Amino acid sequence: MDIDLKTLDSSQQYKLLMSSVLPRPIALVTSLDRNGVINAAPFSLFNIMAASPPTVVIGIDARAPGTPKDTARNIQQTGEFVINLVNEPMADKMNLCASALDADVNELEHSGLTAVASVQVAPPRIAESPISLECSRLTALDIGNERSIIVGTIVHYHIKDQFYDVEKGYVLAEQMGLIARMHGRSWYSRTTDLFEVHRPDTSRYA
Ligand SMILES: Cc1cc2nc3c(=O)[nH]c(=O)nc-3n(C[C@H](O)[C@H](O)[C@H](O)COP(=O)(O)O)c2cc1C
C-alpha cells in the first residue's frame, strides 16, 4: 500500500507518521519564562543531529491556533533550555509534565521531579535524569501549520557518575534504562532488548 500524504488531513498524518518512525527518544525539556517560572515538558520529536558541533533538534506543535506551547515561547524569548533524558523510573513523572497546565505552573513541582542549578544556562536541569544537556538556541525553523523546529547547541553535559566509566570513557547505556516513545498516545519502549551487528569497517567510531 502507498499513500499520498496530501490526501490525508493533519490528524490522519499524525496517526500514520507517529506510529511509523519508532522508537523516538524523549527530551524532557526544562526552560524558564521571562519571570523565571520553571517549565518542563516532554518532546519525542527530538534527536541529536551532530556531535561536533554538538547539535540537537526538537519539533514543537502549537498548543492551539495562535498559541505557542510554553517551551517554544520560552526558548524563543530566553534562548536557553535543558534536555533531560528519561529513564523508566521517571516515566510517570515525565508524563505528568505533559499536562496542559497554566504557564505560571512549575511542572517540576507538579510532577515531583527535582530542579538542580545548571552550570552554563539559567534553566535548571532535573536531578533524576541520568543525562542532562544544557543547550543554547542556534536557530528555529518555522515549518508552517504553526509548527517549529528548534535547533540547539549543547554547551554543557551532565551524566550521573554511576552511568559513566571514567577510565574507558564509556557511557553505560544499558544500565541507564532510557525509555522511548512508541505508537499511540501511551506506548513506550525500553532500551534493554539489544542485539549486536558488527560494522564491516571499524576504523571510525561513527
Ligand atoms: C512522551 C511525550 C512526547 C511528546 N512529544 C511531543 C513533541 O515532540 N512535540 C510536541 O509538540 N508535543 C509533544 N508532546 C506533548 C507536550 O509534552 C505537551 O503538549 C506539553 O503540555 C507541552 O508543554 P508546554 O506548553 O509547557 O511546553 C509529547 C508528550 C509526551 C507525553
Image (tube, grey):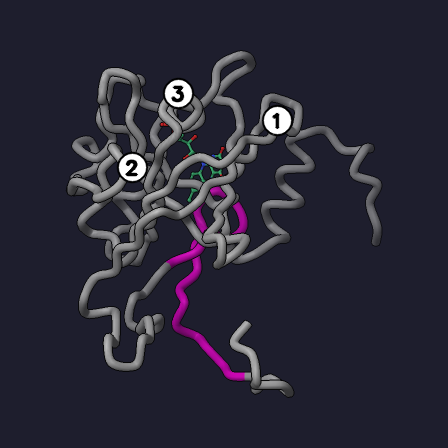
Residue plotted at (29% across, 56% down): 131
Tell me where residue 162 appears, x and y as whole percent: 19, 70
State which quadrant residue 87 falls in: bottom left
Q: Which residue is mark 1?
A: 142
Q: Is residue 181 magenta?
A: yes
Left or right: residue 85 versus residue 202 is left
Between 89 and 80, the one lying in front of the other is 80
Which mark is in front, 1 or 3? Answer: 3
Q: Which residue is mark 2?
A: 96
Q: Is residue 47 magenta?
A: no
Left or right: residue 163 versus residue 137 is left
CA gap, disc 2 to disc 3? 24 Å
The magenta span reads 179-196
Please name the amino acid that badge 1 sits on: Asp
**Mark 2 or mark 3, earlier in chain:** 3
Please name the amino acid that badge 2 sits on: Leu
